[in-house]
DNA sequence: GATGAATGAGGATTCATTCAT
DNA sequence: TATGAATGAATCCTCATTCAT
C-alpha cells in the first residue's frame, strides 16, 4: 500500500528519521499506476488482468502485489490520485460559484473542464464504468462515484437554493449520469464531431438544469 | 461445427423448406437464451460464462455450441429477439407519430414504454452495457445499439423536419445515451424513488428535445 | 464429482436409460485418484499440488477440475474408496467378535490386517496425517478419522461391556493414535526391523487394552 | 549471505572471543524465533511462510535471512533452544534414575513434565510434526527427534539393564511415538477431558514398559 | 546490520471452446 | 443431436529467496 504521507523530495529533508528510502517504491507505484491506466483504457477495468498490468509496467507479478493487494486497490488508488489531480488542476471549479453567474456559463465552464480533464486522462472513463451490473458496485467505483456526486452537489447548490437535500442528490445523480453518457459519446468521436457532442452535452445539461433554476 | 445458417425466424421465410427437426432445436434455443438472460442479469455480460449458461439451461456445454458459435452470438441473438419482442409489444410507438402530438406526450409515452419493457426484461440493460471500452464495441453491442438508434431516429424525425441526417443521428445518439444513463438510475432504485428518477429522465429528454423542436 | 451410483458394467445393463457413458469419466476418476495417491505418498498431502496430480495422471489441470472441485475433494473421495476397499477386503474384522476371543488374538488379527492394508495402500498413511495443526482438521481428515474411530469402537465394545460411551470413545482415540504412531514406525523400516515394530505395536495395544478388559 | 558460523550458544564457548555486536543480533534472533514459534503454532510448520514470520517479528524479510539461511534453519534453531530450555527446566529428569524408583512413578513424572513443557511451549508439537511423509525427515525434524530419542533411551536404560542397544532404541522410538500421539490428543482437548487423556497416556506407557521391566 | 524492493516459478482455479462417442 | 470429457492458456495470488541501497 502506497504511503501517502511520504512524498519524496522536500518532506524527506524535514522528516529526517521516520520512513526511509521509499524513493524506489514510490517510483514503482507511479509506474504501476501508469501501466494500470494504460491497460484499463485498452481493455476496460473488468477485463484488465493484474499480470497484464505488471507486464505493461515491466515488472514481475510479485512486485505488483508488493504494493497493491489486488486489482481493485489499484483502481482505488488510481481514482483517488485522479481526483487529487483534478482538484489541483481545476480546484476553483469547486468553489461555490457566485449565484449571479449565469447557469449557462457555469455549466459550460464545468463541462469544458471535466471534458478536458477526461480527454487528458482517459482512464477516468474506464474507472467510472462499473462492472456491468446495476446494483453491485465495487468499492473502487463507489468511492469515485461518490466523490463525483459530492462535487456536483456542491456546484449545484447555489443554483437551487431551496431544494431539499434528497432532491439535490437526485439531480446530481442525473447530471453525473448525463455527463458519463455524454463523455462516452465525446470520446468515441474526434475533431469537429467531438466538438458537436460536447455542445450537445452542454445543451442537455443547461436545459435540464435551467428549468430547475427558473422554477 | 455449429451451423450458422440455421438462424430461426427471418431466414426461414426466405428458405422455402421449413425443416421440421427444428422444433426441438427451437425449444433448445429458447431455453438457452432464457438461461443466458438469467446469467447475464446475475453476473453481467463480461463475467458470464458459457458453461454457466449451459448449466443454467440444464444442457451440456457441447449442446450450447451446437446452436451458437460463441458467447457473443448468444448475446446477439438475445438482443435481436428482445428487439423483436419490443417491436411486437410496443410496435405502434414506431409508427411515425402525428407531428401534431405534443412532444411531452410523445416522450412520456416512449419513455414509459421503454422503461416498462426494460423492467420486464432486465437483460436488456446488461446487453446495452458494452464491455467498458468506448471506441471498441462488440458486434453484439453494435447491433443492439444500431437498432435502438434507428428507432429513436424514426421517432424523432417528425419533430425535427428540416434537420440534416447527421444531426438527427447525433441527437438520437444523445437521447439513447441519456436513456441508458437514466435507466441505470431507475433500475438502481425502487418504489417512489424509482418513479422520481423516471420523471427526471422524462424531464431531461423533454427539455433537451423541446429546444430543438421549437427552434 | 464422481457419480457413485453408477458403477459401469452390470448396472448399465439394468438401468437402460438414466445416465450414459460415464465409462471414460469413471476411468479418468480412477486414474486421477491413483495419481493423487502417488503424489500424496511422495510429497505428503499438504505439499501435494493439484497440478502435480494432473500431471502425474497425464491430463490437463482442467480435466482434474471436471471431476473434483479441489484438492480436498480428491482426498475425501480417495479416503472413502480406501475405506470401502478395506471393508471389502477385511470386512469380517468389523463383525462384533465373539467375546470369548482372547484379546491378544483379536488385536493381533486386527493389527495384522490394518498393517497389511496400509502397506498395500500407503496413501492411507498420508491421508491420516492431518495438516500439522492439532485442533484444525480438514473435512477430509475428519471423515477418515471418524470412520476409523467408529470402527475401532465397534471392535472394542465386546471387550469392555460396561464401559460408558465417552470412555469407549476415548480409548478408541488412544488406540487409533497408537496405531498411527506405530504405523509410522513400521513404514519407516523394512524386513525384520519392520516385523519387530509390528510386534511392538501389538504389545502396546494388548497391554493397554488388557488392563481395561481384565479390570 | 548469512553467516552460519554465528550460531549462538555452544560454539561461542569454543570461540575464544565473545564478539560484542551480537547483543543486538541475539535479541533479533530471539525475536525472530518467538515470532516463528507463534506462526508455526498458528499455521503449522509447512504452511508457515518466512515472510509471515518476519512480519510477526516486525522486521523485514531481508533481516530474517541475515540470521537464518532458510525456513528449516529457523525450525532447527528453535528446536534446539527448546531442548535446551527443557533440559534446564527439567534437567533432573535426565539423570539416570535410581533403578529402585518404581516404573509408574518414573513414567508419571516424565509424562507430567513433558506434557507440562509442551503445554507451555506449544511450538514443540508443531516442530515434532514432520512434513507428513514417513521415510523422508527434514534435518530439523531429525535433530529434534534424535535428541528426544536419546533422552528417552537414557531414561529407559536403568529399567531394562540387559536389553541390547538396538532393542532399547526400538523401545524408545515406540515410546516417543506413543508420546507424540498422546500429546496430540491431549492438546486437542481441555479441562477434565485433557486430564483424562494424560492419564491414558501414562497408562499406555506404564503397561507397555511394565512388561519389559518385569521381564 | 537493516530495509524494502524484486523476482519468477508455482499454487489453485476458471473458461471458452473442441472432440469422441 | 446431445453429451460430457478434454484442453491449455489465462486468471489471481503467494512465497522462499536475493539484491541494491
Image (cartoon, coloured by chain):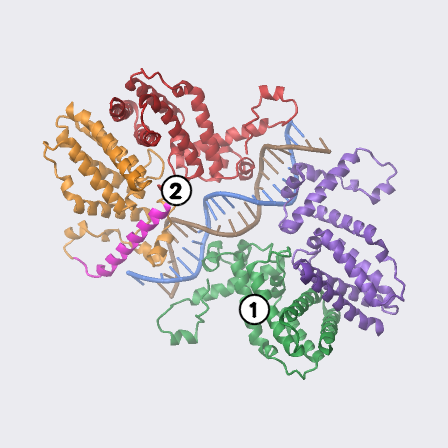
Chain colours: A green, B purple, C red, D orange, E blue, F brown
Q: Is residue B134 visible?
A: no
Please indicate whether residue B166 sits to the left or right of residue D109 in the image.
Answer: right
| The magenta stretch spans residue C111 | no
Question: Which of the chains bears the disc numbered 2?
Answer: C
Residue appearing at x 71%, y 38% in the figure:
B66
- Res D193 → quadrant: top left
Q: Is A134 above or below relative to D124?
A: below
Residue appearing at x 60%, y 54% in the figure:
A47
Q: Residues within 10 Å of mark 1 (few under 14, many from 20)?
A: some
* Towards the viewer: B21 or A63: B21
- Name the quadrant of the N terminus of chain B: top right
Q: How many marks?
A: 2
Please indicate whether residue C79 sits to the left or right of residue B127 in the image.
Answer: left
Let me know if marks 1 and 2 both belong to one chain. Answer: no
Question: Which of the chains bears the disc numbered 1?
Answer: A
Q: Which mark is residue A176?
A: none
* Residue named by callout 2: C136
Which secondary structure lies at badge 1?
A: helix
CA–CA distance in space, label 1 to label 2: 45 Å
Q: Is D12 above or below relative to C203?
A: below
* Towards the viewer: A101 or B116: B116
Q: Which residues are magenta?
A: D18-43
Instruction: Tell us which disc is closer to us: 1 or 2.
Output: 2
Residue appearing at x 88%, y 70% in the figure:
B162
* Residue named by callout 1: A82
Amino acid at each position: 500500500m502506497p504511503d501517502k504521507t511520504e512524498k519524496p523530495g522536500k518532506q524527506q529533508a524535514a522528516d529526517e528519521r521516520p520512513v526511509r528510502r521509499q524513493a524506489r517504491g514510490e517510483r514503482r507505484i507511479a509506474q504501476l499506476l501508469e501501466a494500470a491506466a494504460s491497460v484499463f483504457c485498452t481493455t476496460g477495468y473488468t477485463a484488465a488482468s493484474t499480470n497484464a498490468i505488471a507486464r505493461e509496467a515491466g515488472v514481475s507479478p510479485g512486485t505488483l502485489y508488493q504494493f497493491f493487494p489486488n486489482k481493485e486497490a489499484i483502481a482505488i488508488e488510481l481514482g483517488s490520485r485522479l481526483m487529487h489531480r483534478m482538484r489541483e488542476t481545476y480546484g476553483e471549479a469547486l468553489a461555490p460559484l457566485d449565484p449571479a453567474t449565469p447557469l449557462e456559463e457555469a455549466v459550460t465552464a464545468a463541462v469544458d473542464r471535466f471534458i478536458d480533464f477526461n480527454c487528458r486522462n482517459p482512464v477516468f472513463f474506464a474507472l467510472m464504468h462499473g462492472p456491468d451490473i446495476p446494483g453491485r458496485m465495487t468499492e473502487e467505483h463507489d468511492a469515485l462515484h461518490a466523490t463525483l456526486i459530492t462535487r456536483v452537489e456542491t456546484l449545484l447548490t447555489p443554483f437551487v437554493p431551496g431544494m431539499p437535500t434528497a432532491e439535490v442528490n437526485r439531480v446530481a445523480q442525473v447530471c453525473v449520469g448525463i455527463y458519463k453518457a455524454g463523455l462516452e459519446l465525446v470520446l468515441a468521436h474526434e475533431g469537429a464531431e467531438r466538438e458537436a457532442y460536447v455542445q450537445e452535452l452542454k445543451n442537455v445539461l443547461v436545459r435540464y438544469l435551467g428549468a430547475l433554476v427558473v422554477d
